Amino acid sequence: MTKQKIASAPSIRRLPSYLHIIRLFQREGEEYISGTFIGQKLNLDPIQVRKDLGITGVAGKPKKGYPVEELISAIECFLGWNRTRNAVLVGVGNLGSALLGYQELKRHGLNILAAFDKNPEKTGGTVHGTPVLSVDAMETEILRLGVTTAILTIPSSFAQEIADILIKAGIRGIWNFTNVKLKVPDGVMVQKEDISSGYAMFCIMLHD
Amino acid sequence: MTKQKIASAPSIRRLPSYLHIIRLFQREGEEYISGTFIGQKLNLDPIQVRKDLGITGVAGKPKKGYPVEELISAIECFLGWNRTRNAVLVGVGNLGSALLGYQELKRHGLNILAAFDKNPEKTGGTVHGTPVLSVDAMETEILRLGVTTAILTIPSSFAQEIADILIKAGIRGIWNFTNVKLKVPDGVMVQKEDISSGYAMFCIMLHD
């Protein structure tokens, strides 16, 4: 698919906020939405909006705008949010628990089948409906579930060690919330989501 | 300070991971750390490492590398992490609670003096040691505390409304975890931290 190749990271990152605005508009029963309107809502130039939405393959109609239903489907399809993505989560601390309860990710198809923690006090029960198992059972359980996606919310000092086990168990995509740059073999994808990096940007921006 | 002007966002975002690696190295009692070593640990080109660290104003010495203590201080000073930054947090849901308990942010000087929520069941007590108050008391309390930084972890539908109150109460920097692009007057800074955007990138990257 050449479309995905030309999509820039900032454009992809903006798609969820477009989806959010378009869905609110859909609830009001509107059939078409203009790039200008979306731009106003998101403080973005309409040219940028049209460029970003172009990556989904849907074109706006002159004077009418984008067909709402079709645009929602196209964004969801582009992001793969129109289907369920099974995953496991490792590290049921504050952030891990927050992600297990994060409704928006569920709405986008993320289905966390099991969570793992090394603390015996945390295992055996459920958090936000997801069973929490011992990290000792992780490899076996991931193989049994056939899951290939994992979310890593453990302390950084264990990140590489746990990632190695995950990869051994067949994990091919890791959403990494630790501040460790993981070493992974070819064919394994890592998306780093470092809140400290965001905080660094915030602090620099405040320049106080 | 012209140094900050030439620092690119990706360079700033990498500083926390440098700090992490250098601190681990410091614990082993080493006095100097090489750009090559840091690069190996983070899978980054040493040239990139030297360029990024250059924004802190510390130069490496030939054959020795960077002085560890000085480099840590310089990164912390550059990011303003060598001093306390008072803040309030609005929205004590899963993500808000996680951030209240996030030790790494505390280590980087973030001091959340009070949290606010509209749910009476959540107010009156503390979460991870931070008092949770009613959102009705927010404006008065922020003015009383003299805080100018706020963290927004509320549902998106209330984001603009709450931001307006925060700004009225004197908030000048908002770390925004909602997926709403806030409309704010000149002089108010917003850093958006959208987990859905990260999830969008993750899904595209997996291309499965």
Image (spheres, coloured by chain):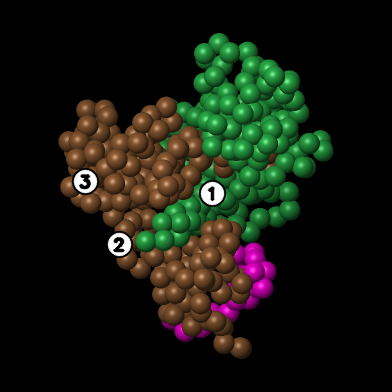
Chain colours: A brown, B green
Q: In the rendered view, would you say A145 is above or below B200?
A: above
Quadrant where the N terminus of chain B lies? Answer: top right
Q: Which amino acid does label 1 sit on?
A: Glu
Mark number, residue B193: 1
Q: Distance between the residues labelled 2 and 3?
A: 19 Å
Tag 2 near tag 3, CB within 8 Å? no
Whichever of labels 2 and 3 marks the residue nearer the N terminus, that label is 2
Q: What stretch is highlighted in magenta?
A: A25-48
Residue in the foreground of this view, choosing between A53 and B139:
A53
Instruction: Find numbered disc 1 in the image and state the secondary structure of the residue it sits on.
Output: loop
Q: Mark 1 lies on which chain?
A: B
Instruction: Find numbered disc 2 in the image and state the secondary structure of the residue it sits on.
Output: loop
Q: What residue type is labelled 3?
A: Leu
- Residue B114 seen: no
**Mark 3 sits on what residue?**
A143
Q: In this view, does B163 lie to the left or right of B188?
A: left
Q: Is residue B64 left or right of residue B141?
A: right
Q: Which chain carries label 2?
A: A
- How many residues crowd around disc 2 within 10 Å: few (fewer than 14), some, or many (20 or more)? some
